Image (tube, coloured by chain):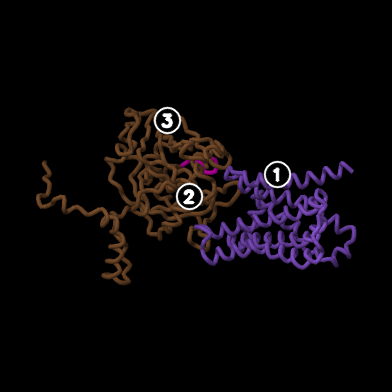
Amino acid sequence: MQFPEPLFTRFLKPLVFACALIPLVLIGWGVWQDSLGANPIEAVTRSTGDWALRFLLLTLALSTLRRLVGWTQGIRLRRMLGLFAFFYASVHLILYLWLDQFFDWGGIWRDILKRPFITVGMLAFLMLIPLAITSPKAMLRRLGKRWKTLHTLIYPLSMLAVLHFWWMKDAKSDVSEPLLYALILAALLGERLYQRFKA
Amino acid sequence: MIIKRAPDLTENDTTAYALYQNRREFLKFLGGAVALGTALPPLAWAKSVFSTDEKPTDFEDITSYNNFYEFGTGKDEPASNAKTLVTSPWSVTVDGECEKPGTYTLEEMLKPHPLEERIYRMRCVEGWSMVIPWQGFPLGSLLKRFQPTSKAKFVRFETLADPQQMPELKQKVLDWPYTEGLRMDEAMHPLTLLATGLYDKPLLNQNGAPLRLVVPWKYGFKSIKSIVRISFVEQQPVSSWEKANAKEYGFYSNVNPEVDHPRWSQYNERRIGEFSKRKTLMFNGYAEQVASLYSGMDLRTYY
């Protein structure tokens, strides 16, 4: 399964880019219209976190799609989707630092040390930073083989991101949503393991 | 001494219900017209000494941002799903260590108790808060009617658990029916309210119609909604949240900025409708009235 090359580069890729911005536009619109309910700050923080996680999973899904249905073009969307994951995660983190903690660094540090769901969330974000920095093609060329090794960080960081969500929801005794993400991640990682041992 | 009925009052002198309902608007209008700028509070109810002067949270927010897991775990779900709750007829079963157990209709429960307004702070364990103008009456005055015996050390409450009316019960998020409890002295405390309305309107279903508990110095989940059973018991009851996760939700669950929830700090809170956070107060600001109930207790152990 492939799209004609001009269709892919001139139409599909920009379309994916535009679609990836839709959550941001909707969130911005919701803030502008004050239609995010009684606690808009919580709503925006949650939804940017959700989207960071969704883009992570989408990024992971592209190579799975290549192996399972032979869609090789998808890999060329991977950098973009990965960077969108980083983008939404950054907004999510900034909202926490600013509107939840009001840049009280002492409080933030205590939060990171004492609260496991914050600890793993922060760890996942830290691991995402080198991946974003080394995303340009020039970096890939410079790092060579080490680039690939470095980018396997996406596996543990995705697990930490799901765990972050899980532990946050677990306090409310409702893990149905994080469970769904965990299952999708398990399928994506499981497929990789399967390919590895099959070979 | 015989108190005679005032002879000059007839049925026509009673206030029309619609007018009664509108008195707040009327008073606001009066207040605005007569005393421009002198900030007269609208005196709809005799002002309770327990009421706060803080600005009440918007009605829209109080009725659309709720935790009522029987109607879904999302904050916006109870407002849309709780329409299926049938609050009339309603009855409450009273049992356990008391002289007058039985099943009472809502009317029988409420009849002897004059309603009063109490504007209370409400602090959710999740870190947000509201100011809510409740209408209700002290729980203690109701409990006394059933003549609890000396064995009654605690009061246990149950929410309705009817899968027909509450479709989310099939999600075993908690062990239904939702159960809560208070120590007898907490239950008899004058701050402890049974509410039937808020903002001068009967309670909406998502807020726990037709009858709910309000314990303003404890985290919101202690204030059990849509009560169908009140039991006087000798042993400390186990609340639903305690059963689900005893390390995180204790029996007392008094608002306490010093004792963190294992997953987040309780040091501050976001008042719904406000941008910045404010510091959480010991016993949610009711320390003067209730701190003595817990003197000598280590509040880190009895969280």
Q: Mark 3 lies on which chain?
A: B
Residue pictured at 51% horizontal, 59% vertical: B278
Which residues are drawn in magenta? B295-301
Predominant SS of the magenta segment: loop
- What shade does chain A have? purple
Quick check: do tags 2 and 3 share a chain? yes
- Whether residue B254 is visible, yes or no, is no
> Who comes first in sequence, dot 2 or dot 3?
2
Write down the chain letter for disc 1: A
Query: In the figure, is residue A137 to the left or right of A23?
Result: right
Q: Which chain is drawn using brown?
A: B
Q: Is there a contact, CB below 8 Å, between mark 2 and mark 3?
A: no
The residue to which callout 3 is attached is: B233
Do residues under tags 1 and 3 come within 8 Å of each other at their CB atoms? no
Position of residue A181 measured from the top left corner of the image (x, y, whole percent): 68, 48
**Which residue is label 1 attached to?**
A183
Query: Is B189 left or right of B12, judged from the image as shown?
Result: right
Label 2: chain letter: B
The residue that mark 2 highlights is B80
Numbered disc in front, either 1 or 2: 2
